[in-house]
Amino acid sequence: MFKADIFPSIRIRKTPFWDRVVEAGVKSCSVYNHMLMPVRFETYDIDYFHLKEHVQLWDVSCERQIEVTGQEATKLIELLSPRPIKNLRIGKCLYFPVVDQHGGMLNDPVLLKLSETRYWISIADSDYLLWVLALVAAYNLNVKVFEPDVSPLGVQGPKSDELMSRVFGSSIMDLKFFEFQAYEFAGKEHFVSRSGYSKQGGFEIYVEGFENGIPMWDTLMEAGEDLSVRAGGPNYPERVEGGLLSYGTDITLNNNPFESGLGKYCDVNSTPKCLGYEALKRVFENGWEREIRSLDVEGDKVPLCHVPWKVTADGEFAGNVTSITWSPGFKTNVAIGMIEKEFWNPNTEVLVHAPDYPRKAKVRDKFFI
Amino acid sequence: MFKADIFPSIRIRKTPFWDRVVEAGVKSCSVYNHMLMPVRFETYDIDYFHLKEHVQLWDVSCERQIEVTGQEATKLIELLSPRPIKNLRIGKCLYFPVVDQHGGMLNDPVLLKLSETRYWISIADSDYLLWVLALVAAYNLNVKVFEPDVSPLGVQGPKSDELMSRVFGSSIMDLKFFEFQAYEFAGKEHFVSRSGYSKQGGFEIYVEGFENGIPMWDTLMEAGEDLSVRAGGPNYPERVEGGLLSYGTDITLNNNPFESGLGKYCDVNSTPKCLGYEALKRVFENGWEREIRSLDVEGDKVPLCHVPWKVTADGEFAGNVTSITWSPGFKTNVAIGMIEKEFWNPNTEVLVHAPDYPRKAKVRDKFFI
């Protein structure tokens, strides 16, 4: 690979927590939604075991929000996704695959219902705001759509309940998975949800106002000193073994939600207002040719994966691997790939063409958890 | 600032030229349209003087193309911008500010007319594709819109005519500024335009097919050995002194084209089909409150600029500086800023609030060229 600085500019936005991230010794970062995202502080292995044992603060400011407010907010939201929102209650989060008119995935955000006329779409890495704004322009909808000054701070790991209780009070323990509620901090209300981009449990604090970032960070760090709290970030091995998809890596505009393994979130019959309704109904009825799978890949640690690696079975094309890394916990290479129908059954033996040498691999029935 | 690796993933795309970029010793890079962009190989100063004297190859693959093809291609293009395309000939490029229905800038691409029913929109850093695709979906237009497998390679600097003649033949010298034509290389046609993100003259080769990247790079490097050709990239001091705007840095969705200094490209009277027509007509008639300006900033070298720096005049708010750096050629700090009307006249004296100490500055009538 290569070693190079990221050139600092306004275009690649600094986060409210960034000064603390630098002080914590960030070693590797990414750019996500035109914003810096720290992903490594020690080695991925050390970060991984710490995350599974203690609690970490994650600067995930780059999970930007699209706020949709107004009389036609629900009407607009219903255009976007094949997932029904009819029964969605205020204070609930919903994993929300969003598609174009051909059923292609435009992003895989989380939807938060703030009121009957107000939503946040918490987006993955694409300027999905532009798609939503264009629909507002074309259909002349009576809504306001914009990116609010909100920066999520992840609190992830098994000790996150304890840490969050100390700062926000023990009532936060009652929050169920994918529920959110407003909590006061520094004289301002901030939504807190039980959610996050890890399988280790935890919360996301939607910090309102850039200026509240550092005080929030410092308060949590101080309160968690005896819990070994430290800075962290989305951990590559932990996300790949746990099957947390990365939009732009594992799924793109060329994939529909069924291929993306998100079929269970698509009720194509009850969402006729979705722009992709007709297309997805056809996919649902006729079936699809490939789907996301977890793979267990033999051999020693694989190199870094910067382009899709071909997968074959008996010399035939069987798909691509898009995320792959050594799991220090499961002591094997774990992968996410888009596997052709003929080969997607559990225990199918395939060959993953890593750039160093091809490795035997097995398609799994579920992710490593 | 900070030192950190960029985590390699498929989401941050590798370019066709990337192996050569790494071999050339890239020192600093950026992420642009979800793709790596090299911006520094030695110091910015060394790169700057080399660019002004010799010729450089720039991996600007990240200038992605949006291809619009079909019967309603022109109809769609006319929705996008207040710049008329009625007289645009095939083989011409056009700087093409694109706006939403409120006149806000969504990107500042270059439009290439390939045929009467085929265009490329060569975009700056935003997923403008999503805006265009949404309009196609909403208006049900008879066009195909997609990102082709095309990666621009910049050939920039005073010796670029000589280098390009050697590879593509001397007819390439007849190409006028912002004209393009197809040239054969390795049995395939590639468009070449006289254009680029520097003021030193040069070309952009729209390399067709990822697999042709390395052969194109190697051929140019070999042909230019005695011309001191080497790898380069958009040079920060050269772009800021020359007034080449950066979308996301100097201009955003919050600015209209008049504020962005692009008023001369907007004929709001003759482009009623543009979605921002009504809004921009109002701006044109009523005037605007701030506009992009070049500034000459006193004092020694300024630090890196990662957030907008406030500009004041006699204690009053006068605007923001968004790009600022030491120019090794002009031996002063050069800046681009959005300056309030009251202070935008040439020679107005202002104070730029750099994070180390405030510096006296002067608003200029034009950029440094």
Image: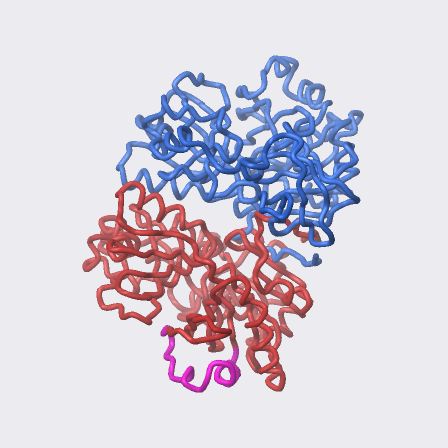
Chain colours: A red, B blue
Q: State the residue at coordinates (60%, 79%).
A: A229
Q: Nearer the viewer, residue B362 or A57?
A: B362
Q: Nearer the viewer, residue B170 or A364?
A: B170
Type of secondary structure dominating the magenta stretch: helix
Q: Where residue B35 appears, x then y in whole percent? A: 56, 46
Magenta-tinted stretch: A157-179
Above or below, B34 relative to B344: below
Q: Please state if A84 lies on the left or on the right of B266 as rendered.
A: left
Q: State the residue at coordinates (47%, 29%).
A: B96
Q: State the residue at coordinates (62%, 16%).
A: B172
| Magenta-drawn stretch contains B358 | no
Q: Where residue B331 appears, x then y in whole percent? A: 79, 35
Q: Please state if B129 lies on the left or on the right of B338 as rendered.
A: left
**Extreme residue toward the front, this view:** B314
Q: Where residue B281 appears, x then y in whole percent? A: 37, 30
Q: Please state if A263 lies on the left or on the right of A336 as rendered.
A: left
* Residue B344 visible in the picture: yes
Above or below, A225 relative to A36: below
Q: Where residue A300 appears, x then y in whole percent? A: 63, 67
* Residue A314 visible in the picture: no
Q: Please state if B115 lies on the left or on the right of B52 as rendered.
A: left
**Residue B102, quarter of the rendered image:** top left
Q: State the residue at coordinates (29%, 40%).
A: A138
How many numbered marks have been drawn onto this rendered protein structure? 0
